[in-house]
Image: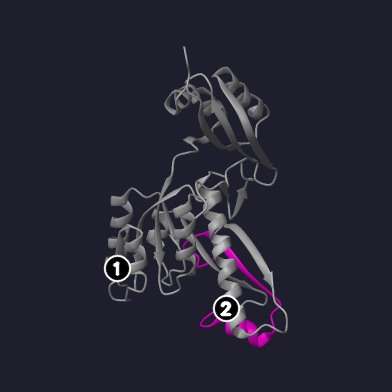
Amino acid sequence: MTTETKQFALRVACPSIRGVTADIAGFLAANGCNIRDSAQFDDENTGRYFMRVSFRSEEGRTLEDLDAAFAPLVAQYGMEHEFFDEAAKRKVVLMVSRFGHCLNDLLYRWRIGALPIDIVAVISNHLDYQKVVVNHDIPFHHINVTKANKPEAEALQMRVVEESGADLIVLARYMQVLSDEMCRKMSGRIINIHHSFLPSFKGANPYKQAYERGVKLIGATSHYVTADLDEGPIIEQDTVRITHAQSGEDYVSLGRDVESQVLARAIHAHVHGRVFINGNKTIVFPASPNSFASERMG
């Protein structure tokens, strides 16, 4: 008799109680599963425990089998949990305005298989990238947004998300503020990217402001979207150094590059189930072996 080996993962969040790690490991072993990679964190400040386990099901157990058998431990520890297939691609809707660097970067990573996602739609309040998107055989939805039609526009956006079956929205430099209602409805399922400067510059042309102040570090922050503008739990950040020799145009180019990288890393962590929201913060576990491998080189 032959059995098919499947690569699965388990996410767990629960109150911190002695024995939970051992019981999870024991459960997987007893159900014919071999752990490949495991990460856990016990937050003493909140009394919460977080765990992500990557494992192979070596005796034919399916996700449904494992989920049903796991129920007693869920009840015992008061767990929030999810079993998922690491090979399954998450459905994602991208939203973009007139800055296309993040969009183009994500389209390339998607095309070569560097991100385990299925881009099911792109929504924009402008037509600048319609041809680029359609040439990738991805549905493009132009939804104009004004102060007068914002509720109707967001209803159309949510219809695209729901009809496409997407479980994640990525704001790839989408320059419209989402309503509180939409943020609550998609809580933990909208990822945004924005620049990060010290000191902080808001409003128009932040890179120009940074250049005029002689900023030496340009950064980017990717975070979950909440009703508090740019205040959601942070997933990923990075910086690039600037010298006095850089021009204002250099600031923009370097900033866009770091924005693209940070957003891609945040999406990678989310779709691999490595991110746990912990109050106003996040727990972000390291990537499992081979999870950055691309299906093809270009």
What residue is pinned by disc 1?
A: 142
Relative to 155, say whether 207 is above or below: below
Residue 277 located within the stretch drawn in magenta: no
Q: Where does the magenta region start and end?
A: 201-230
Please say if 21 is above or below 174.
Answer: above
Residue beneath the point at 36% across and 74% down: 128
Type of amino acid at the residue the image marks with label 2: Val
Q: Which mark is residue 240?
A: none
Q: Which residue is mark 2?
A: 252
The answer, for residue 222, to whether it is visible in the render is: no
Q: Residue at x 58, y 61 (%)?
A: 262
Q: Secondary structure at mark 2?
A: helix
Q: State the residue in front, 181 or 207.
A: 207
The local crowd at label 1, few if under 14, some if 14 to 19, many if 20 or more residues have their Cα within 10 Å, is some
| Circle nearer the viewer, 1 or 2 | 2
**How many C-alpha atoms fall within 10 Å of the one at disc 2: few (<14), some, or many (≥20)?**
some
Q: Quadrant of residue 35?
A: top right
Where residue 123 appears, as percent x and y from the top left, is 35, 64
Residue 150 visible in image:
yes
Identified by mark 1, the residue type is His
Q: Earlier in the sequence, mark 1 or mark 2?
A: 1
At 52% from the left and 81% from the top, the residue drawn is 203
Q: Position of residue 96 (x, y in %)?
A: 41, 67
Residue 8 pos. (x, y %): 51, 32
Circle count: 2
Name the element at disc 1. strand
Give yes or no for residue 220 being in the magenta stretch.
yes
Q: How far is mark 1 from mark 2, CA to CA?
A: 26 Å
> Compared with residue 164, is residue 39 higher up or lower down, i.e. above or below?
above
Q: Identify the residue at horizontal 49%, vertical 69% (top origin).
A: 101
